[in-house]
Amino acid sequence: MDSVRAKRRAGETKLVLDSVLDVSRAQALYRTLDQALGQSAPIVMDGSRVERVDTAAVQMLAAFGRAAHERGLKLKWQAPSAALRQAVDLLGLGAMCGFEA
């Protein structure tokens, strides 16, 4: 199972994260995030389904957030789950992931 699904709509790319984001799914996550960086549309990240996330996945999301910023792409989070927010906050990577303060 993929760890993220991409939905491209007029004017934005929406990425819907799966319930589990861990190192075993890192390659699929990387592929989809990398493809999204190639688009010129704003990116909406739906993290509402995330129940379990490990450090490797959070680091990948942080690198993605930084890369999106460097490319001038707008990145917005839609309803990040408590588990996702807790993992990101624990690692101190909220700003890099693109979470609003």
Image (cartoon, rainbow, N blue to C red):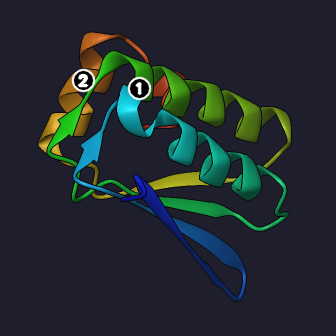
Disc 1 designates what residue? Answer: 58
Residues at circles 1 and 2 in contact by the CB criterion of under 8 Å: yes
Give the crowd class for mark 1: few <14, some 14-19, many >=20 residues within 10 Å: many
Image spot of residue 5 (x, y percent): 48, 67
- Residue appearing at x 84%, y 55% in the figure: 38
Residue 21 appears in which quarter of the rendering? top left
Seen in the picture, residue 49 relative to 66 is either above or below; the reply is below
| Tag 2: amino acid | Ala
Query: In this view, which residue lies farthest toward the bottom?
Result: 10
Seen in the picture, residue 100 relative to 44 is either above or below; the reply is above
- Residue appearing at x 77%, y 50% in the figure: 37
Image spot of residue 76 (x, y percent): 52, 54
Q: Is residue 48 left or right of residue 41?
A: left
Q: Nearer the viewer, residue 40 or 53?
A: 53
Asked whether the viewer can see residue 101, the reply is: no
| Tag 1: amino acid | Val
Image spot of residue 59 (x, y percent): 48, 20
Looking at the rendering, in which quadrant would you find the N terminus? bottom left
Image spot of residue 46 (x, y percent): 38, 61
Q: Is residue 96 left or right of residue 48?
A: right
Q: CA distance from mark 1 to mark 2?
A: 7 Å
- Residue appearing at x 63%, y 35% in the figure: 64
Q: Judging from the image, what secondary structure is the residue with disc 2 in?
A: helix
Q: Earlier in the sequence, mark 1 or mark 2?
A: 1
Disc 2 designates what residue? Answer: 87
Asked whether the viewer can see residue 18, the reply is: yes
- Residue appearing at x 39%, y 27% in the figure: 23
Query: In this view, which residue lies farthest toward the top?
Result: 91
Q: Is residue 60 left or right of residue 81?
A: right
Q: Judging from the image, what secondary structure is the residue with disc 1 in?
A: helix
